[in-house]
Amino acid sequence: MKHLAIVPGDGIGKEVIDVGLKVLDAVSEVSSFDYDGELFDIGSDRYLTTGELLTQEDIDSLRKKDAIYFGAIGDPRVKPGILEQGVLLKMRAVFDQYINLRPVTSWFPFVPLKREVPFDIHFLRENTEDFYMGAGGTFNGSKKDAHVKVKREMYELEMELRTKSSNNDDFAFEIGLLSRKGITRFAEYAFNYAKAKGHKKVTLVDKANVCTHIYGMQREIFEAKAKEHGMGLDYMFVDAMAMAMIVRPETFGTVAVPNLFGDILTDLGSQLQGGLGMGGSGNINPKGVSMFEPIHGSAPDIAGQKKANPVAAILAGEMMLKNIGYPKEGEMLRKAVRYCLDNQLTTADLGGKLNTDAVGEAVCKFILGQKK
């Protein structure tokens, strides 16, 4: 029996996670997989009612679970950044989910590229450092310093930024931080992952020609790890990588990328495979609780209309099953998705005529048909 935390969140997150749970129920009927799910009311409704984001009580309960199944966060009634930083980014930091795994797969016939070539890119995004640290602030030319405080599982960091300006203009800043320990464990995971997938090298994406300090140290550590593992290491600047993903996506296997660039490139990757509704994501702590989610947002413009594509949430469920020890059951979900795509059992964003629930029913029907 696996113990799952269910966090539907906001908007279409509630709809697609509801479908995802029905799919998990179907899997449990035809396999040895069994689970209980505890529902967590974390999102905009609670925040607007109580002012609570992610409480210590939430954290203590979530930490006891085998995995977290997450929907989406974001609401037009709440100022951008409050929910994202106070819930999603905080979860990743508190549970030290330092790897974000986002596969980019050629789900034909929905790949928009002219050249029909299969690809399977495994993006490993560092998930707790870089420019998503929350290490930023504002100051005025008349103010002489700014205080920055960062807390992570590995360290707590406090900095004072001394300022001197020739005028009283307003300034804003964000600091990108990488630690040697953070990069080392990221690189170790990347090379082990590539080896497990049968890839002979890791492609490291950065902007070391401009951000020389943080990405210079990152390159140094990745080079040492490549030698240690006896594997290849390629470098790509992030702008060149964006172009290469369009022109030659089939040439990439395991791709390691820092947090900010990873967020951008994997959204580009989602369009290569058919849109945001086609991508699952895993926030991984190899030694702790991990969280799995669709890569799309809460989409308030279509929330409650049953238009949302649930495939991303289902594929997130696939990743979750594989992570908690049920690889065959995870593959069952993937085959069910492939069956639906091949038979036009899709939502309108993929040219189909089904609503959110009907796609889920088609996936469940396929899975239940596997019962021996």
Image (tube, rainbow, N blue to C red):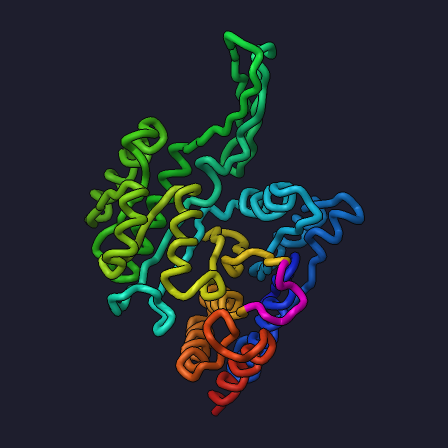
Location of residue 72 by image quarter: bottom right
In magenta, the rendered stretch is: 301-308
Q: Main secondary structure of the magenta part?
A: loop
> Does residue 133 appear left or right of residue 47 in this picture?
left
Q: Which residue lies at the image location 69% right of the left edge and 53% below the top edge? A: 42
Q: Between residue 25 and residue 32, name the one nearer to us.
A: 25
Q: Is residue 307 magenta?
A: yes
Q: Is residue 30 magenta?
A: no
> Residue 292: percent from the left, percent from the top?
52, 59
Do we see residue 7 in this rendering? no
Judge whether 311 appears above or below 77 on screen: below
Q: Say left or right for 289 vs 201.
A: right
Classify 171 as above or below 218.
above
Rendered location of residue 304, percent (x, y): 67, 67
Quadrant of residue 1 within the rendered picture: bottom right
Question: In this picture, is 94 found above or below 147?
Answer: below
Q: Residue 90: x and y, percent?
A: 59, 43
Q: Residue at x 74, y 45 (%)?
A: 52
| Residue at position x 46%, y 65% in the image | 319
Residue 347 appears anywhere in the view: yes
In the figure, 90 relative to 160: above or below?
A: below
Residue 9: quarter of image: bottom right
